[in-house]
Each structure stands twice: as structure tokens, then as C-alpha cells.
Image (cartoon, helix red, strand yellow):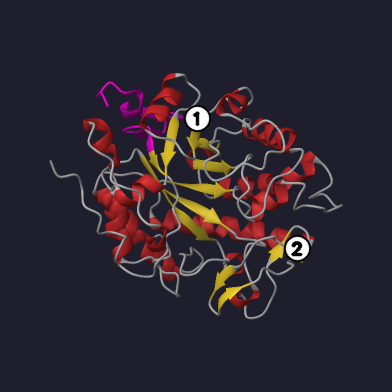
């Protein structure tokens, strides 16, 4: 890659955030926080090794105990977790990096084994059609979730607000609201998983309401130009995909255009599967209605990422799996060095040091 590559050019995000390049480390759930969900020194090493990215987005981080749905993923709902994340963020900053925290609630993509026997929650009592979920008791079948009451919805919105406040206390440069991949906010957005008949369902604007209230709450703690939102209009992960997805996500992007967000992060690629319920939404489709900074993600390589930036379809491109085995991905792109082989899936979530912060940088 030439040093004149559009991927390597700095970018100013809404004038308050200067990124040294347009390469983003995508959020990657790695399951190294332990059962107490407190970020640790190993995680600080892992993230700081990758600080040459223009922006690092943390792995998905649960906003509350109710939001839990993954083994050993980190949290941001108590003081110990804030201190753990502070260790990580300080290490990234010391290495010259910029880092956002991704705020997460799993919704129905969880199991009662995580919640002392209480069912997971969702907008509607619709079971996730999946093979199984890994829980503290081993592999379990998904359950029909409990539909959130309006009062519980308000409490969850407040949990996002408190989590955003804690993220700022930990020193993050901003936050990303995870509204994709079949987790709670996405479950509200999509007609497949939202059959409510109150103000939070029944129409495209009503299905957007939950995300809007969360964004407004987070804005009370974090400057709007330090908030990103992630969407996945095309994805099937966690049994998603709705017939009216183009209308729904066009509306969502239109509404988000009313805010001066740090960026809109769109899983536009089809590398993780496509529900095939219509023509896939592209970055150029989103560009028509969202005029702020736009981030593409899912299956990009060096060439396609450069094309997306050069064609002004995106301002930033997020890379996920390549960052597992290439801590120096930016330098490899910059110098046309070989990209390391993709790490085997068995180490992605393994609760061990091996296959995490031990991938070497390129050796000439």
C-alpha cells in the first residue's frame, strides 16, 4: 500500500476528534475478562499492541448484569470494571491510540443460566432460533425471553446512561451504541423480533424509539460527537432479518442524521451471511440519507477498503478478524507486508493467554 493510500490519510471527525488514519479495529468479543468481567493487564497488552489503528472500538461490553449473555465478556456496571478498563485505556493512550467503548445488552441472545434462573429479556417473547448458547452450565438451548415492560425499558435506558458515564470515568475517548447483530437494540428495531403494540412497536418510527431514547440518555453523559452507533441491516446473526429491513434501516439512518454523531458504523458486507429478504443495503444507500462520518465493516480487505474510501462511500473502514492475528495491521498495509493467516476459531474466545496477545509483529 502506498503511503498516499486513502486508508492512511488522517481524518477529522466532526472537528473534535483527529484520527491518524482511517483504519478501525472493529469490536471483537474475545472472552478474556474472567467470570468477574473485570478488564485486566492481559487485555491492556492486547489492545495497546493494536494502537496504531486510527480508532479502536472495544469488544462488546455489557451495561448491566441483565445485559449479560456471553462467557467472560467484560462489563461496565461497577467500579472495579471501571478501574480495569482505565488500565486498558491508559495503555492504549500511552501507545498513541484512540479508543471507544462499545455498549452492549444481549437481550434474547442470552440464557437464564446467566441470570440466576430468570429468563433473558427482549422486546417480545420470541425465541431465538439457534442451535445452542454457551453458558456457565455448558451448552444450552435458547429460551423464549420475557417481554420487557415499559418500566423495564426505562430502567434499561438508564443503564445505558450509567454505563456511558462509567466509560467516561475510565477515560475512553467516546462510546459506540451496539444496535446490531441481533442484540437488544436490534431486536427492537426489527419487525421479526418486535411484535409490540405500544409506543415501542407496531410501526417503523415506534421500533426506532428505544434506540432514540438510549442515544438521548447517552448524550447526557457523552458529547454527541464522541458517540457512534452500529447497525447491521443485512445480517442473519442471532436469527435476524426482517422483510421491511430497507424501509426500517433507511428511516433509522435518516433519524441519526439529525445528530452530529462521531460516526455511523454499518455492517454492510455480507461475509457473515445475508438474510436475502431484498437487495442488500450498501454504504451508498446509507450515504443518501446519512451525511455524517460513515464506517463500513464486514469482509473488507486492503483493496476493497481503499476503494470504499476513494469512492467516498465511507470515511472509515473497520477490520475485525485480521486484527486478531495482525496486531500491526496498519504497518502491514502501509508497507505491503504479508498479512498473517487468520487465527483459528478455537482461540477466538478461549479463556487463556494463548492466541490473544502473543501474535508477533511482522519480521522482515
Location of the C terminus by quadrant is top left
Q: Position of residue 301 (x, y in %)?
A: 39, 34
Tell whether 319 sits left or right of 91.
right
Q: Position of residue 112 (x, y in %)?
A: 65, 75
Q: Give yes or no for residue 21 being in the magenta stretch.
A: yes
Q: Which residue is mark 1?
A: 293
Q: Earlier in the sequence, mark 1 or mark 2?
A: 2
Residue at (26, 51) in percent of width and height:
49
Quote the CA–CA distance across marks 1 and 2.
33 Å
Q: Nearer the viewer, residue 99 or 273?
A: 273
- Where does residue 222 sit, x and y in percent of width and height? 51, 47
Q: Can the viewer see residue 353 in this picture?
A: yes
Q: Residues within 10 Å of mark 1 (few under 14, many from 20)?
A: many
Answer few, some or many: residues within 10 Å of disc 2's Cα (few below 14, many 20 plus, some between 14 and 19). some
Residues drawn in magenta: 1-23
Quick one: quadrant of the N terminus?
Answer: top left
Q: Position of residue 164 (x, y in %)?
A: 52, 54
| Residue pointed to by mark 2 | 148
- Quick check: 79 above or below 153? below
Q: Residue at x 46, y 19 (%)?
A: 311
Residue 316 numbered tag: none
Residues under numbered marks 1 and 2 in contact, where contact means CB atoms less than 8 Å apart: no
* As drawn, 66 above or below 97: below
Can you name the residue that lies furthest to the right here? Answer: 197
- Residue 34 location, quadrant: bottom left
Q: Is residue 331 magenta?
A: no
Amino acid at each position: 500500500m502506498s503511503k498516499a493510500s486513502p486508508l492512511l490519510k488522517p481524518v477529522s471527525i466532526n472537528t473534535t476528534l483527529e484520527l491518524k488514519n482511517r483504519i478501525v479495529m472493529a469490536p471483537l468479543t474475545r472472552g478474556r475478562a474472567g467470570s468477574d468481567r473485570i478488564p485486566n493487564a492481559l487485555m491492556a497488552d492486547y489492545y495497546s499492541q493494536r494502537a496504531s489503528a486510527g480508532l479502536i472500538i472495544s469488544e462488546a461490553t455489557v451495561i448491566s448484569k441483565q445485559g449479560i449473555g456471553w462467557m467472560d465478556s467484560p462489563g461496565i456496571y461497577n467500579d472495579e470494571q471501571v478501574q480495569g478498563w482505565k488500565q486498558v485505556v491508559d495503555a492504549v493512550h500511552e501507545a498513541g491510540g484512540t479508543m471507544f467503548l462499545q455498549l452492549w445488552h444481549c437481550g434474547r441472545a442470552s440464557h437464564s443460566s446467566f441470570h440466576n434462573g430468570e429468563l433473558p429479556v427482549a422486546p417480545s417473547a420470541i425465541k431465538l432460533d439457534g442451535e445452542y448458547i454457551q453458558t456457565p452450565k455448558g451448552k444450552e438451548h435458547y429460551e423464549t425471553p420475557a417481554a420487557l415492560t415499559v418500566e423495564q425499558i426505562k430502567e434499561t435506558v438508564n443503564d445505558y446512561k450509567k454505563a456511558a458515564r462509567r466509560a467516561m470515568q475510565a477515560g475512553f475517548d467516546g462510546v459506540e451504541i451496539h444496535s446490531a447483530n441481533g442484540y437488544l437494540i436490534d431486536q427492537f428495531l426489527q419487525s421479526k423480533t418486535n411484535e409490540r403494540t405500544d409506543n415501542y412497536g407496531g410501526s417503523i418510527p415506534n421500533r426506532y424509539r428505544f434506540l432514540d431514547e438510549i442515544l438521548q440518555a447517552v448524550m447526557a453523559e457523552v458529547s454527541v460527537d464522541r458517540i457512534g452507533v452500529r447497525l447491521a441491516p443485512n445480517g442473519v446473526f442471532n436469527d435476524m432479518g426482517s422483510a421491511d429491513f430497507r424501509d426500517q434501516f433507511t428511516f433509522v439512518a435518516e433519524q441519526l442524521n439529525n445528530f452530529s454523531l462521531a460516526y455511523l458504523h454499518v455492517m454492510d458486507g455480507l461475509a457473515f451471511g445475508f438474510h436475502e429478504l431484498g437487495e442488500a443495503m450498501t454504504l451508498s444507500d446509507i450515504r443518501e440519507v446519512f451525511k455524517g462520518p460513515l464506517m463500513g465493516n464486514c469482509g473488507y480487505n486492503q483493496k476493497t477498503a481503499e476503494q470504499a474510501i476513494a469512492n467516498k462511500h465511507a470515511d472509515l473502514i473497520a477490520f475485525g478478524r485480521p486484527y486478531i492475528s495482525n496486531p500491526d495491521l496498519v504497518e502491514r498495509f502501509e508497507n505491503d507486508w504479508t498479512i498473517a493467516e487468520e487465527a483459528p476459531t478455537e482461540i477466538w474466545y478461549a479463556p487463556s493467554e494463548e492466541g490473544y496477545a502473543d501474535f508477533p509483529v511482522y519480521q522482515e
